[in-house]
């Protein structure tokens, strides 16, 4: 089984694992996972990634599946983490540069592994296909919605069934940007308008003309697709009652889903959009009325 560390292709790894006695192979993988869970250097991290890829193929049995990913903070520094399908972090470590490789920030092992680059799991766990961030600034009347979006996120994480929709599409990344004309810091106050015609005559505040939705391209990463969209909310939206705001946001999510469905169908990518739509509508209905 030690050969798996030298098998680069996921397809080849899958073929190799299919030829092994499954329970024996799984137990060996678990023994390696337990040994590498507290990885001390980049070599052990990369081996842990391969173990997680193998367990995703062969199945985690009665253990909780985890995903091993290497990512970068906004300052460019790397961090590695083990995460479950509910986005709960089980372990996270920061790294610092050492020549052309890396060592753990708080680790005791400063062995220099020349030329080692971070590996990150390619066959990801099925997780909620709707993932979003909210702008840090927003008008005061949006506060109840802003908080309620957190409960919606939890519902989507735990009640959607991503394992049933298909493996070729991963997520829609949504960035929600809110107007904030009444921010306590005058220098950061601004509003969004969707067209020049919406700007009142003589308006003197800081503003941007932005489309309601600004889509990125459908990205293919390791044969798995994702897409991102920016959603700009106007002051007029923020002045609506909470119930009306929720209805608009719910319509947004159904639109996001349909937009992506059309994209996937054009590329003949198999994805159970009908099941996702049914699940999504149930969650949104409950959220609107909660």
Image (cartoon, rainbow, N blue to C red):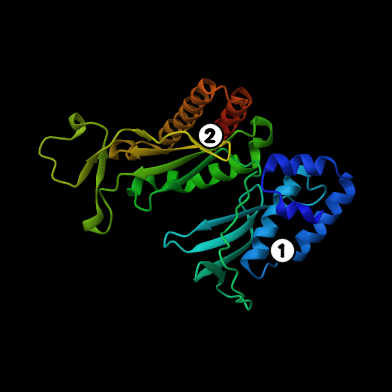
Residue at image location 54% in from the left, 33% down from the top: 284
Q: In this view, does 73 lie above or below 232?
A: below
- Kind of element beneath mark 1: loop
Q: Is residue 7 left or right of residue 247?
A: right
**Relative to the observer, which residue lies in front, 164 or 159?**
164
Residue at image location 44% in from the left, 34% down from the top: 249
Q: Where is residue 58 shown, x and y percent of the image? A: 79, 44
For residue 37, the mark is 1
Residue at image location 89% in from the left, 50% down from the top: 24
Q: Is residue 8 left or right of residue 116?
A: right
For residue 125, the mark is none
Q: Mark 1 or mark 2, which is nearer to you?
A: 1
Please identify the quadrant where the C terminus is shown. top right
Q: In this view, does 247 lie to the left or right of 179?
A: right
Q: Which of marks 1 and 2 is nearer the N terminus?
A: 1
For residue 289, the mark is 2
**Relative to the observer, which residue lies in front, 209 or 198?**
209
């Amino acid at each position: 089984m030690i050969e798996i560390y030298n098998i680069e292709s996921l397809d080849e790894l899958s073929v190799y694992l299919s030829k092994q006695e499954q329970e024996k192979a799984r137990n060996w993988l678990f023994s390696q996972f337990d040994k590498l869970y507290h990885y001390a250097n980049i070599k052990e991290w990369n081996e842990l990634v391969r173990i997680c890829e193998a367990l995703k193929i062969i199945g985690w049995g009665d253990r909780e599946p985890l995903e091993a990913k290497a990512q970068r903070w906004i300052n460019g520094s790397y961090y590695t983490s083990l995460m479950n399908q509910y986005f709960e972090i089980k372990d996270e470590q920061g790294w610092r540069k050492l020549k052309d490789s890396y060592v753990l920030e708080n680790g005791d092992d400063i062995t220099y592994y020349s030329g080692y680059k971070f590996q990150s799991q390619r066959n990801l766990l099925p997780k909620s296909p709707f993932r979003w961030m909210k702008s840090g600034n927003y008008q005061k009347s949006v506060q109840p919605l802003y908080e309620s979006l957190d409960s919606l996120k939890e519902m989507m994480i735990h009640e959607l069934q991503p394992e049933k929709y298909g493996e070729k599409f991963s997520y829609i990344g949504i960035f929600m940007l809110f107007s904030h004309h009444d921010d306590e810091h005058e220098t950061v106050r601004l509003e969004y308008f969707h067209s020049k015609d919406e700007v009142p005559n003589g308006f003197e505040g800081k503003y941007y003309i932005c489309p309601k939705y600004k889509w990125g391209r459908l990205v293919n990463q390791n044969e798995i697709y994702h897409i991102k969209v920016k959603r700009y909310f106007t002051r007029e939206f923020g002045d609506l009652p909470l119930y009306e705001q929720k209805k608009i946001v719910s319509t947004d999510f159904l639109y996001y889903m349909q937009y992506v469905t059309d994209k996937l169908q054009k590329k003949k990518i198999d994805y159970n959009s009908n099941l996702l739509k049914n699940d999504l509508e149930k969650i949104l209905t409950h959220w609107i009325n909660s």
